[in-house]
Amino acid sequence: MDYRLNSTKSYHVYELGTLGWELTVCNALYPPQTPIRKILLHDDSYGHFLYDYLSRLVPMADIRKVLEIGGGYGYLMKDFLDRNSSLRPCMLDISPFLLQRQKETLEGHDIFYREEDFLETDPAVLTGFDLAVLNENLGDFPTLVNLSEEFFEPPAQVIDPNLKRALDLFERYNFERPAQGLFNFNIGAIEALEKICASGVPYVYLGEHSCEAAVPGHLQSMIHVDSKGSPERISLKGHDEYTIKMSYLEKIAHTFHYTSVRGPFADFIPVDFTDRLRFILASQGRYGDEDEMICQFVEDLYKYEYLVLAKQ
Ligand SMILES: C[S@@+](CC[C@H](N)C(=O)[O-])C[C@H]1O[C@@H](n2cnc3c(N)ncnc32)[C@H](O)[C@@H]1O
């Protein structure tokens, strides 16, 4: 079996000097002047939209200790602190460059910072947090690539510890096996969520590019999202990341007795489908750079899924 483990670690630790190449939904919405905000039902930033949505599902006024893993430029947490100044955040990131950017964005706030790979974080560190936030980072976590059916019929002695762990995960969570052919497995994302759920953090928000996303029927003529159901490679500057099989993550959460709410980012970033926007989408943004950006953004609102998990 010609498989490999995709890792973005050395890119994040030694090479990353900007997130500009991978414009996240959060960063795209951050500049107040961005044309993207004009297509929304109201003009606001990602972290504000998310905080307001989470307030419907989580007692946000009672949340104090919040752990954000992979906070990028720190914009989401800045927005959360605007909404709730009694939050006591801890920002954990593998990238020294981004951690420095977070310190600049969040200057003046009482924040704890940890520079580490979350997969190596001591689980004891998670004790006492009320909420964990993972926004658009699980696709960066290690992925086993090009597995085949042979994976499920290992020789008596499985040598590679990554394969052994992946097989154990399939068994432990009774994951549905992929249909025939080669497939990729988000082992890092799964182990990260398993660590969080095992530690009993009461609330978890995660959002990422999903390989199982779907557009509601009434929008399918305008918004095109082609989900393969199995994690797919996205090539970015200096590294590859993989889309996430959300149903596996949901299964882990349920095993640890969390309830889950799942949906597209469009649930909390409401779009105003005016005639002009419908035209831009129908023409696939081909009449200008701004239209192309808008088209891409609206598609992303349906390609990206979130899970809000609450411990029962
Ligand atoms: C694509 S950026 C997303 C940034 C931000 N959350 C946003 O939505 O704009 C991914 C983030 O995850 C961090 N990251 C990637 N792998 C990580 C790991 N193993 N442990 C901790 N942080 C990690 C990166 O350094 C970066 O901050």
Image (spheres, helix red, strand yellow):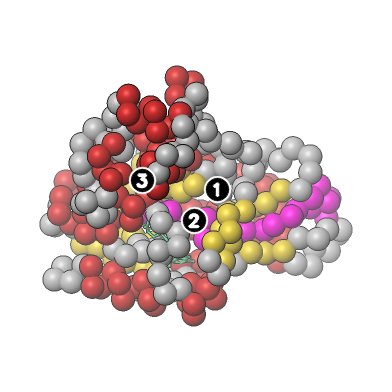
* Residue 27 or residue 62, whichever sits in front: 27
Q: Which residue is mark 2?
A: 138
Q: Quadrant of the C terminus?
A: top left
* Residue 144 highlighted magenta (yes or no): yes
Residue 53, which numbered label? none
The Cα–Cα distance between marks 2 and 1, rounded to whole angstroms, is 7 Å
**In the structure shown, which secondary structural element does the residue marked by tag 2 occupy?**
helix
Range of magenta residues: 133-154
The Cα–Cα distance between marks 2 and 3, rounded to whole angstroms, is 29 Å
Label located before the other in sequence (2 or 1):
2
**In the structure shown, which secondary structural element does the residue marked by tag 3 occupy?**
helix
* Residue 40 or residue 254, whichever sits in front: 40
User: From what the image shows, is residue 287 above or below residue 17?
Assistant: above
Q: Which residue, as the protein is rendered here, is positioned at the far top?
A: 218
Residue 311, image x, y percentages: 37, 43
Residue 9 in view here? yes
Q: Which residue is mark 3?
A: 290
The Cα–Cα distance between marks 1 and 3, rounded to whole angstroms, is 28 Å
Residue 143, image x, y percentages: 62, 58
Residue 133, image x, y percentages: 35, 54
Q: Which residue is mark 1?
A: 244
